[in-house]
Amino acid sequence: LTENQALLLSRYARKANILFDGDLSGIKAALRAIGILINAQVEVHIVLLPEECDPDEFIKEKGRDALENLVSTAPDFFTFYRQVSKISSVEDEANLIKELIEIISKIQDPIRLDRYLKHTSQVFDIPVDILRKKIGINFSAKKPIEKETKKKTITPNPEEKLIILILNNLKYIDKAKDIISVDDFNDAGIKNIYSALLKNADFSVQKIVDLKIEEELKNRLLASLIETEKLREEEFIQSLNFYKKNLLRAKLKSKISEAIRSGDEESLKKFKELLKK
């Protein structure tokens, strides 16, 4: 879900119901989508199906009216998130509140931001001034309070995006082996991951944690994986070919730069011809 899509949806509806399967395995991944909808001035409610039940099965077993009843009585996101989260300590609740603040802090409209902060305050019974302070906003002064540190967001590069695509669609690993080789990657850490993946048929995303690669790369990959959609086989193959083509073009451009620096006219001409293909 992109910001532009959320804005388009907001033209037709002020309320969105997000429906989860009963196991809630995707709720963390959905946080970004919820934040985007809220920022587009769409009110978000959550519909939760019974465990191990998808919409098709639910309608077949319970009927359309039962599903519509779930939708009509769906709680808002804040209430729902508190109900389903396993809180066994003060620390658990504090972390839950931090996650919600992270979502609503992206709201640009100060009036709506204030409204959501007050709503969070009511749901979790915590003074609203503490929530305002947490996101660094002084409403009485009408200006932001400068934070001591700012987190730097790093966008995955093409090689990282490719390995994320593969890791998030491991059931198609045989197709990846046919198209992508270890030598297609330049980054040593990503080479390491892909080599381990090719050698181990039971490779899982969790095993990234155990690999000897840079912590920053490891954290970036793990953080990006939860935001990446799983694809159908045809889409996966198309994406692999797209990324491989871009990686090859990047290598050719690098070789062209080297040829220019060294004055190698013959190699320069060859690489430029290959780039046109």
Image (cartoon, rainbow, N blue to C red):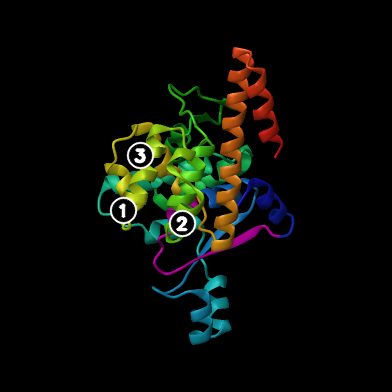
Question: Does 49 sit above or below residue 138?
Answer: below
In the image, which is nearer the foreground, mark 2 or mark 1?
A: 1
Q: Amino acid at mark 2?
A: Asn
Distance, label 3 to label 1, CA atoms, is 12 Å
Q: Which element carries disc 3, helix, strand or loop? A: helix
Answer with left or right where residue 57 lies relative to residue 270.
Answer: left
Q: CA distance from mark 2 to mark 1?
A: 15 Å
Q: Write the residue at 69% across / 29% down.
A: 272
Q: Nearer the viewer, residue 54 or 96?
A: 54
Query: Does residue 193 appear in the picture of this structure?
Result: yes
Tag in front: 2 or 3 = 3
| Secondary structure under the numbered disc 1 in the rendered image | loop
Q: Amino acid at mark 1?
A: Asn
Residue that label 2 marks: 169
Q: Amino acid at mark 3?
A: Asn
Dot placed on the residue nearer the N-terminal end, 2 or 3: 2
Indicate yes or no whether the magenta region holds residue 14. yes
Proximity of marks 2 and 3: CB atoms separated by less than 8 Å: no
In the rendering, at what x and y percent does residue 28 appear? 43, 53
Pointer 1 residue? 200
Circle 3 sits on which residue? 192
- Up the image or down, 261 lies above or below 37; here it is above
Q: Nearer the viewer, residue 53 or 199?
A: 199
Q: Residues within 10 Å of mark 3 (few under 14, many from 20)?
A: some
For image coordinates 63% across by 17% down, the residue present is 264
Name which residue lies at 33% across and 54% down: 203
| Magenta residue span | 13-31
In the displayed structure, does residue 236 sit left or right of residue 3? left
Disc 2 packing (10 Å; few <14; some 14–19; many ≥20): some
Which residue extends farthest right?
11
Query: Mark 1 packing: few (<14 Cα in 10 Å), some, or many (20+)?
Result: few
- Rendered location of residue 117, percent (x, y): 51, 43
